[in-house]
Image (cartoon, helix red, strand yellow):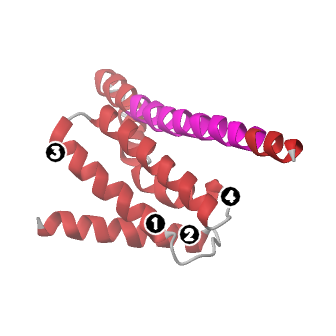
Amino acid sequence: MINMIIQVLAAGFASLGFAILYNVKGHKIWVGGILTWGLYLILYKIFHQDVICYFLVTSFITFYVELAARIFKTPTTTFLVAAIIIIIPGGGLYRTIAALMEQRWQNFIDAGFNTLSIALAIAAGIMVVSSISSFFTTIINICKKNKSADI
């Protein structure tokens, strides 16, 4: 349990570090990293499958980002980059390239497939939630315009 708490706090600091590195202003940025890694750890204990966990975590975090962006009147990418950077499969990419350079072809294929699957799960989670959010935002704006035109 203490290991999970340390991991979650480290994710928060890493998220804050990337926010500072990319000159992102705001004191609420680090929350995304904590939520992202905490949720990943919880979901991994339930599902024990990386791709499912990454998709669900990314979907939840993108929903959080969409809400936070509207509350703080900030672009969604401001929050999204700091939150998602925690789960980017950098280690998997390293293992893929290392296997390629060492000509361990089966390891290269396995690591590459896993890394690509995780990257696609992250992209799909962002895409699905962002599309749904955009759809509902458009509908709300159309309803507001129609309501104000009736007056």
The residues tagged by marks 2 and 1 sit, at their Cα atoms, a distance apart of: 6 Å
Residue named by callout 4: 75
Residue extent of the magenta highlight = 115-142
Query: Height in image: 49 above or below 106?
Result: below
* Three-letter amino acid code at the position of disc 1: Ser
The residues tagged by marks 4 and 2 sit, at their Cα atoms, a distance apart of: 14 Å
Which residue lies at the image location 35% right of the left edge and 33% below the top edge?
99
Query: In the rendered structure, which disc, 4 or 2, sits on the residue that comes first in sequence?
Result: 2
Helix, strand or loop status at disc 3 = helix
Residue named by callout 2: 19
Q: Residues within 10 Å of mark 1 (few under 14, many from 20)?
A: many
Q: Nearer the viewer, residue 107 or 103?
A: 107
Q: Nearer the viewer, residue 139 or 4?
A: 139
User: Which quadrant of the figure has residue 138?
Assistant: top right
Query: In the rendered structure, which disc, 1 or 4, sits on the residue that comes first in sequence?
Result: 1
Which residue lies at the image location 63% right of the left edge and 38% below the top edge?
136
Q: Are the residues at dot 2 and dot 1 in contact (C-beta closer than 8 Å)?
A: yes
Furthest toward the bottom, the residue is: 27
Residue 129 position within the rendered picture, expressed as x and y whole percent measured from the top left: 53, 38
Furthest toward the left, the residue is: 1
The residues tagged by marks 3 and 2 sit, at their Cα atoms, a distance apart of: 28 Å
Residue 76 position within the rendered picture, expressed as x and y whole percent measured from the top left: 63, 55
Helix, strand or loop status at disc 1 = helix
* Three-letter amino acid code at the position of disc 2: Ala
Which residue lies at the image location 29% right of the left edge and 27% below the top edge?
107
Residue 22 position within the rendered picture, expressed as x and y whole percent measured from the top left: 63, 67
Q: Is residue 116 magenta?
A: yes
Q: Are the residues at dot 3 and dot 1 in contact (C-beta closer than 8 Å)?
A: no
Helix, strand or loop status at disc 4 = loop
Residue named by callout 3: 45
* Three-letter amino acid code at the position of disc 3: Lys
